[in-house]
Amino acid sequence: MDLGITGRVALVLSAGGGLGSAIAVALAREGATVIGCGSNAERLERTAQRVSDVGGTMVPMLADLTKVDELDGLVAFAKKKAGAISILVNMTGGPPPGPTAGVEVGTWRTYVESMVLPVFRLTDLVLPDMREQRWGRVITSTSSGVVSPIPNLGISNALRSTLVGWSKSLSAEVGRDGITANIVLPGRIATGRIVSLDAAKAEREGRQVEDVAAESVSRIPVGRYGDPAEYGDVVAFLASERASYITGSVTRVDGGMIPSI
């Protein structure tokens, strides 16, 4: 299937991470030019090499998304390098594990500024070009905790849920401009983030990491953690011409793990 995104410019946040890298590769394989943002130069270069290996093009861009006032310059640089952005993949880092109650106000502020505000601002910056093109895709990766809150991930559950309400509202505002806005939820995808969460749980409960991971796998109907490439492929489809009638949705890539309907 031709996804119809050859020549489109995609801005992918957290492109040096496990999910972000897989998304960058999937989009590039389909012919999109990728601007890959991240805070770690070495990881970005590894993703750029993976993109090159599949015959694609990625421009790595170091960026500190917490500096919201500097995002205008980031988008201007991306447009100078590759042209108007028509696909935006929003993904921000997760907060540390912990309860919801008793979180300091300063901590809430820190993670709102790093997880939520950059998504709002970057989307606002790329929407004018999408409207001019009469075509755009805004895809935001969050967490399964937005539909089934994950114990001991209080900050994540709260702030990522904010992004779901925002995306749904946005989809109603931009649909007639040829722009879609969708949320994607990862289940237990085999990335560094999942490894660290398993390790934290093991330490908290005085158990072996292997036992924690096996327990998680036992609750996944397909019987394994997901491959990041499987997640990247779903995002690439939602970014495609073929997905033009999908908007305001929440798509789970979880192997059937999330218990709610």
Image: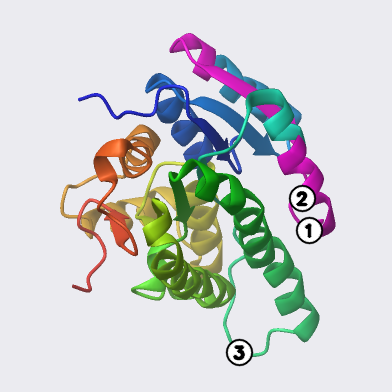
Badge 2 element: helix
Task: Indicate left or right for 196 with 213 as reference.
Answer: right
- Is label 1 in contact with label 2 (beta carbons under 8 Å)? yes
Q: Horizontal and vertical percent for residue 177?
A: 43, 55
Task: Indicate left or right for 30 with 90 as reference.
Answer: left
Badge 3 element: loop
Q: Residue at x 39, y 51 (%)?
A: 178
Q: Which label lies toward us, 3 or 1?
A: 1
Q: Amino acid at mark 3?
A: Ala
Task: Indicate left or right for 187 with 208 as reference.
Answer: left
Label 3, on which residue? 101
Residue 182 visible at all: no
Question: In 3D space, how far apart are the residues under numbered discs 3 and 1 (Cα atoms)?
Answer: 27 Å
Q: Nearer the viewer, residue 114 or 188?
A: 114
Q: Nearer the viewer, residue 163 or 222?
A: 163
| Mark 3 vs 2, N-terminal side | 2
Question: In 3D space, how far apart are the residues under numbered discs 3 and 2 (Cα atoms)?
Answer: 32 Å
Q: Residue at x 28, y 53 (%)?
A: 254
Residue 121, located in which quarter of the rendered image? bottom right
Label 2, on which residue? 71
Magenta segment:
50-76
> Counting other residues with Cα less than 10 Å from the Cα at mark 3, is it few (<14), some (14-19), or many (20 or more)?
few
Q: Horizontal and vertical percent for residue 61?
A: 72, 32
Label 1, on which residue? 68
